[in-house]
Amino acid sequence: MIELKHLRTLATLRDTGSLTATATALHLTQSALSHQLKDLEVRIGGTLFLRKTRPVRFTAEGNILLRLADDVLPKLTKAEHELAGLKEDLNGRLHMAIECHSCFQWLMPALKEYQVTWPNVSLDFSSGFGFEPLPALVSGELDLVITSDIQPRNEVHYEPLFDFEMRLICATSHPLANKKLITPADLTDQTMLSYPVQKQRLDVIKHFLQPAGVEPAKWKQADNTLMLVQMVSAGLGVAALPNWAISEFSRQGLIVSKPLGEGLWRRLFAAVRGSEHDRRYLQAFFSTAKQQSSSHLDGIKMA
């Protein structure tokens, strides 16, 4: 029977051109190498190569086995790499940062479903609001960042998840509740409520107010979406939130939502290291996140 070690030996002998170099490359003694080759020649009933020739000249039998080696060994190497990658995927790590308070609304159910089929992937996350997450992603401290703010970098892949609309919410009795749409100038005398995030990182600032050179009269912060909605409902200010985060409160009549300009649409991404974006456990997370958001979030558009 021809064994893989025989094919590797013959391929190495061809590449090195001598028995001495082959023995060194395969970490064999000269005696062990000669014994292996003699054993193979006995098995096939023929000579593999002509002795005392440099470089080694193979016989017809030897060339047949070399062609077999050229066919089999690359496939074996590829399979070994795939098996190693699969083992790594099954036991991967997914430490993430979320640059979106509202995202917890769909992310937690998505992670729960994800863990059912990928139980050995280590999950952990940070809010991502007290530090810059992209440098941490590139350095390997994080593995994924949920963000709507693209900062093009060659080493980062941005996987699109879905598009959403940022809308202004106000109390039902608020003067802005009667407007068809909100302009930047409408917010100059307003108290703007937001999550505890640096103002320059807010979509409503970067993509609506700042281009118009507008700054609201006051700012107040709230820790979570429910608190923001309650404060808005009580007339303590207005806020800009994703359409899917406030749709239920709007249906209940607790607040009124209005478009910002002709509609401030943003796209949410999962940012990962470019060298790893095709790993199976990351692709599975992308798929789960898209499926969960498509099934349970109002007013979004799949990217």
Image (spheres, rainbow, N blue to C red):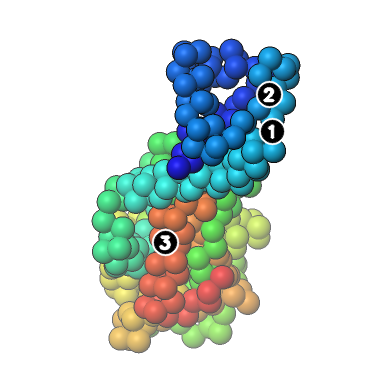
Q: Where is residue 148 in the image (x, y as percent from the top left)?
A: 52, 58
Q: Name the residue under label 2.
A: 50
Q: Which mark is residue 59?
A: 1
Q: Which of marks 2 and 1 is nearer the N terminus?
A: 2
Q: Which of marks 1 and 3 is in front?
A: 1
Q: Earlier in the sequence, mark 1 or mark 3?
A: 1
The residue tagged with tag 3: helix, strand or loop?
helix
Q: Mark 3 points at which residue?
A: 284
Gap in angstroms between the C-alphas marked 1 and 3? 51 Å
Q: How many marks?
A: 3
Quarter holding the C terminus? bottom right
Are the residues at dot 2 and dot 1 in contact (C-beta closer than 8 Å)? yes
Q: As displayed, is residue 240 above or below residue 101?
A: below
- Whether pointer 2 and pointer 3 mark residues with C-beta atoms closer than 8 Å, the reply is no
- Disc 3 marks a residue whose amino acid type is Ala
Quadrant into which the N terminus falls: top left
Whether residue 237 is visible: no
Which label is found at residue 37?
A: none
Instruction: Give neighbour class at mark 2: few <14, some 14-19, many 20+ (Cα, 10 Å).
Output: few
Alpha carbons under labels 2 and 1: distance apart? 7 Å
